[in-house]
Image (cartoon, grey):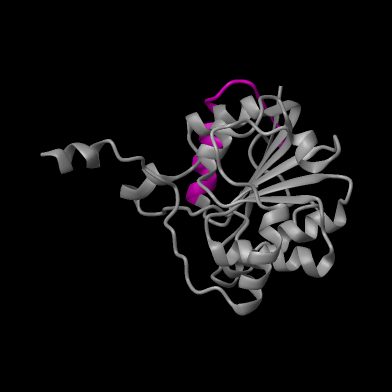
């Protein structure tokens, strides 16, 4: 009976840990870079100015994968700060290796559940942008409850963005794109930046990710959504 009760109260997560094996380079980068650029999860609000040593605008990306697009953004926009959240350790190691190779110092990394990080570590009204690129679509109907984009998530994001801050999402699953749009349309306090009140063309500052390339090879389209906090 206790096992049934425990299962019913278990947190539904939007991800599954698929650790895989880290390469030697990823392991070296992880061990050498995390002490300086990694953030240990705690239920304590971060001071972003102290964290980066400046007051530059901060972009938070949830689920950066292997880190190629986040590293590219950080290199292209050195006067912006970036926080990347990823639970996949090889992906964290890969991003840190890219940071080391390109001498990037404007990224901080958290390897923990993004929902917990948003709730407990990110200050209110502090982010200029939140990016969610190609999250797990959980395309089977019985798994839709695992999708990260839902009313509670969107409300939490809005609380963390500055006035005028941007929520930018992208997916290569049309069903998920329509789901994202529906969620955003039923929550108040957002302005859709689409001229047609649905999707926007891919912005120039969003690098093409491997997930997008894979989706295009499979014949998928790509949908970008951008909403401004108002």
**Is 79 located above or below residue 217 in the figure?**
above
Number of dots carrying numbers: 0
Is residue 221 a member of the stretch shown in magenta? no
Give me the residue at 82% from left, 59% from top.
104
Residue 195 appears in the figure: no
Q: Would residue 161 appear left or right of 155 to someone viewing this image?
A: right
Q: Which residues are magenta?
A: 175-195
Along the line of sight, which residue is nearer the eye, 82 or 182?
Answer: 82
| Quadrant occupied by the C terminus | top right
* Residue 103 location (% of width, % of height): 84, 63
Give me the residue at 64% from left, 47% from top.
39
User: Can you tell which quarter of the image residue 157 is in?
Assistant: top right
* Residue 178 location (% of width, % of height): 52, 43
Q: Would residue 67 appear left or right of 101 to someone viewing this image?
A: left
Give me the residue at 54% from left, 33% from top.
43
Is residue 193 a member of the stretch shown in magenta? yes
**Is 188 located above or below residue 111 in the figure?**
above
Along the line of sight, which residue is nearer the eye, 134 or 35?
Answer: 35
């Amino acid at each position: 009976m206790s096992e049934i009760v425990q299962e019913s109260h278990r947190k539904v997560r939007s991800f599954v840990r698929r650790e895989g094996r880290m390469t030697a380079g990823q392991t070296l980068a992880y061990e050498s870079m995390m002490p300086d650029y990694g953030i240990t999860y705690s239920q304590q609000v971060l001071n972003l100015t102290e964290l980066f040593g400046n007051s530059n605008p901060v972009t938070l990306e949830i689920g950066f994968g292997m880190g190629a697009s986040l590293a590219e953004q950080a290199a292209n926009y050195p006067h912006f700060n970036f926080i990347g959240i990823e639970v996949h350790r090889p992906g964290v190691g890969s991003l840190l290796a890219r940071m080391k190779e390109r001498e990037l110092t404007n990224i901080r990394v958290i390897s923990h559940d993004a929902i917990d990080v948003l709730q407990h570590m990110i200050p209110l009204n502090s982010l200029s942008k939140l990016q969610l690129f190609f999250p797990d679509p959980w395309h089977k109907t019985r798994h839709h409850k695992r999708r990260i984009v839902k009313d509670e998530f969107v409300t939490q994001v809005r609380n963390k963005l500055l006035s005028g801050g941007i929520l930018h999402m992208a997916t290569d699953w049309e069903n998920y794109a329509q789901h994202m749009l529906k969620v955003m349309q039923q929550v108040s306090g957002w302005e859709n930046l689409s001229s047609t009140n649905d999707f926007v063309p891919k912005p120039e500052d969003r690098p093409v990710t491997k997930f997008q390339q894979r989706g295009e090879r499979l014949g998928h389209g790509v949908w970008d959504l951008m909403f401004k906090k108002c």
